[in-house]
């Protein structure tokens, strides 16, 4: 049997956990040599909504783990028994992933620098509360939104005068 790429469909959000369980299963059964590589697509972006406490990580191919190796019926059945595994795609009777396709996908995902991308919900004229920093609990009005910097210029009343303050998205809350 030749080594080919398989895709293990899993519950979204459990990719890393199930990858570790598959590796542990292979070690216990003495079948580690049959699997050359297990790949979990990395997070796509981290969206920050209103505050640092609310972060959402999304994956490129949420709910999938890619495996390169020889999976016989015994291994496939053992993997399918792991809680959170839905199905295994690949092999003789199912769609076979071409190695070139998967290698290209992996190189694209690995090369691309993935950095947090804030999802802002602020527009000029919005009333906001500053949640952290020296201006915590101040209320102001959004004057300018700078999505490329992840900041907002807010007009805050200090000693009766409108003062522009540049604040990060994560330290603001819409009122």
Image (cartoon, rainbow, N blue to C red):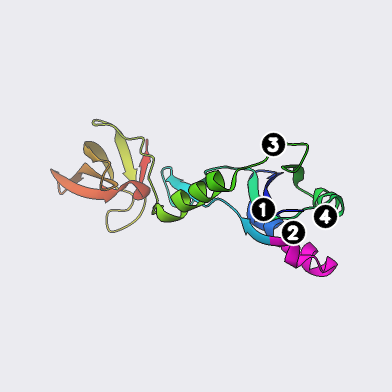
Q: Residue 101 got which mark?
A: none
Instruction: Identify which residue, 61 or 126, lies in the foreground.
Output: 61
Q: Do residues under tags 3 and 2 come within 8 Å of each other at their CB atoms?
A: no
- In x, y percent, where is residue 39? 60, 55
SS of the residue under disc 2? helix
Q: Single out the residue that lies furthest toward the left.
A: 161
Please indicate, yes or no, whether residue 100 appears anywhere in the rendered image.
yes
Q: Is residue 54 visible?
A: no
For the magenta stretch, what is the residue range? 21-35
Give the numbered dot on residue 67.
Answer: 1
Where does label 3 land, which residue? 95
Task: Mark 4 and mark 1 in contact? Answer it, CB < 8 Å.
Answer: no
Q: Residue at x 19, y 49 (%)?
A: 165
Horizontal side, residue 123 vs residue 14: left or right: left
Please name the residue shown 26% across and 49% down the image: 167
Quarter of the figure that contains the C terminus: top left
- How dense is the environment of label 4, judged by Cα within 10 Å: few (below 14), some, or many (20 and up)? some
Whole-Å distance between the Cαs marked 2 and 1?
10 Å
Mark 2 and mark 4: span between their CA atoms? 10 Å
Residue shown at 32% from the left, 39% from the top: 128
Task: Considering the whole magenta stretch, tell me its main secondary structure.
Answer: helix
Where does the image place residue 79, in percent across and percent down from the top left?
80, 52
Query: Do the CB atoms of the residues marked 2 and 1 lie less than 8 Å apart?
Result: yes
Q: Position of residue 57 (x, y in %)?
A: 51, 48
Q: Earlier in the sequence, mark 2 or mark 4?
A: 2
- Magenta span has 29? yes
Q: Secondary structure at mark 1?
A: strand
In the rendering, which numbered label is found on residue 22? 2
Q: Where residue 164 appears, x then y in whole percent?
A: 16, 45
Label 2 crowding class (10 Å Cα cut-off): few <14, some 14-19, many 20+? some
Give the labeled residue for mark 4. 75
**Depth-wise, is mark 1 or mark 3 nearer the camera?**
3
């Amino acid at each position: 049997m030749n080594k080919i790429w398989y895709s293990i469909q899993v519950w979204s959000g459990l990719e890393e956990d199930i990858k570790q369980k598959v590796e542990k299963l292979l070690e216990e059964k003495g079948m580690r040599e049959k699997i050359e590589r297990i790949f979990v697509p990395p997070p796509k972006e981290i969206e920050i909504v209103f505050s640092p406490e609310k972060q959402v990580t999304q994956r490129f191919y949420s709910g999938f783990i890619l495996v390169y190796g020889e999976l016989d019926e015994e291994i496939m059945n053992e993997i399918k028994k792991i809680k959170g595994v839905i199905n295994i795609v690949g092999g003789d009777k199912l769609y076979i992933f071409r190695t070139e396709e998967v290698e290209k996908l992996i190189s694209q995902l690995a090369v691309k620098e993935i950095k947090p991308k804030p999802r802002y919900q602020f527009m000029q004229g919005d009333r906001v509360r500053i949640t952290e920093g020296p201006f915590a609990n101040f209320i102001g009005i959004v004057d300018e939104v700078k999505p490329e910097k992840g900041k907002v210029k807010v007009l805050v009343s200090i000693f009766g005068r409108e003062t522009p303050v540049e604040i990060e998205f994560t330290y603001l809350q819409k009122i």
